Image (cartoon, rainbow, N blue to C red):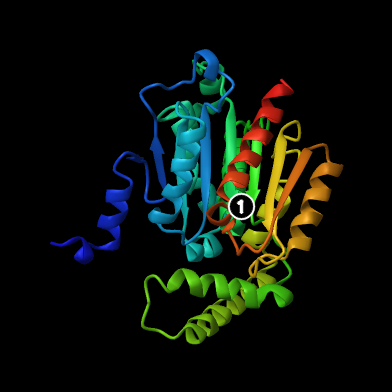
Amino acid sequence: MSSTDSSPAEKQESLLKSFTRLSNQVYTQTPASFPPSGPSTSHPTTIVLYGWGDALPKHLTKYVVGFRALYPSSRIILIFGPILKALYQTLEARATTMIPVIEAIYGPGSYSNLTEAIKSHPIKENILLQVMSNTGGMNCAATMYAFHKATNGEQRLPYNLMICDSCPGSTDFASNVGRWSKAMAVGASSFLPFIPFIISQSIAAMFLASLHGFGWIIGATSAAEYSVGAVNNPTLSDNSSKRLYLYSKEDDIIHWEDIEAHAADARSKGWSVSAEMFEGTPHVGHMKTHSEKYWKAIDDAWREAVAKE
């Protein structure tokens, strides 16, 4: 079979051959030099990369290469984010899906007795969270919820730095359905290339409207609404950590004003906040266009985060 005939699953496995598959969504890569030591002790022990909705392996592995260049001895946990799954799952179901993320840090089976696993963990974790777009935010928030629940509400998921790339946006349905349906249609185009984009977006908009209407009827909090609040909720999210927002005014999926409002809210609740605005870049397109500036902003924020300790 030629490479052009490979199935999407086969291509994903090929691109991720240096990773260990923990679930359909979660993969991990631990270098032989882990954990960081010597001059690299200030590097992250673990980088958790929450991909944007329907991101393909060929997209996310570019970020793995960038992080590996900065922090060669760090463990990397990579999370894929199917948009439909993130939207229709309940919070409990999303949290269960994210348990492999926690067990990648604290060891297989650790979730069932997480408090004890944390106490006996052999290294001091320095954790960097890279959250990309709203779908990445939904999965990050679900991880925080799962961690909090497993420790009987006594502990928050520990991290030194959270990077919010092109997120979060407003959760108002009426003003955002066009943008959300566009994001879903873009993701679906990789799997349904023969369907005209306008039709894909229309179907996505109708699906979102149905989901929103059902949620309104039963009084449920949407996945997007929960995640936007959770990452700025000091009960779930560590407000002694550092926060970095990466965004642009040209983003056609997330309003830049919404990101700045979220940053201001985080700052008011105790987070140390930095922001980097990029010129002329689309949604989750800042690294591709301004690679040097992008990675410098991340490394500078990380150095600031660990310098506080």
Residue 91: x, y in percent? 58, 53
Residue at mark 1: 137
Can you tell which quarter of the image residue 304 is in?
A: top right
Density class for disc 1 (Cα within 10 Å; few <14, some 14-19, many ≥20) is: many
Q: Which image quarter: residue 171? A: bottom right
Look at 60% across and 57% down and name the residue there: 133
Residue nearer the viewer, 232 or 147? 232
Question: In the rendering, at what x and y percent does residue 159 appear?
Answer: 63, 32
Which quarter of the figure is the C terminus placed in? top right
Q: Which residue type does callout 1 highlight?
A: Gly
Give left or right: position of 159 versus 96.
Answer: right
Residue at (72, 77) in percent of width and height: 174
Q: Residue furthest top?
A: 38
Q: How many numbered markers are drawn?
A: 1
Q: Which of 79 and 56 is in front in this view?
A: 56
Q: Tell me: residue 92, above or below residue 192.
A: above
Residue 136, x across and y down, in percent: 56, 53
From the image, which quarter does the N terminus lie in?
bottom left
Secondary-structure class at tag 1: helix
The answer to whether one can see residue 168 in this image is no
- Residue 260 in view: yes
In screen coordinates, is 76 left or right of 222?
left
Q: Which of 260 and 282 lies nearest the eye of the viewer? A: 282
As drawn, the residue found furthest toward the right would be 268
Q: Is residue 232 above or below residue 196?
A: above
Vertically, is 238 above or below 119?
A: below
Q: Which one is nearer the viewer's eye here, 240 or 272?
A: 272
Q: Position of residue 268 (x, y in %)?
A: 86, 43
Task: Identify which residue is drawn at 61% across, 58% down.
Answer: 134
Residue in the image at 58% along x and 31% along y: 127
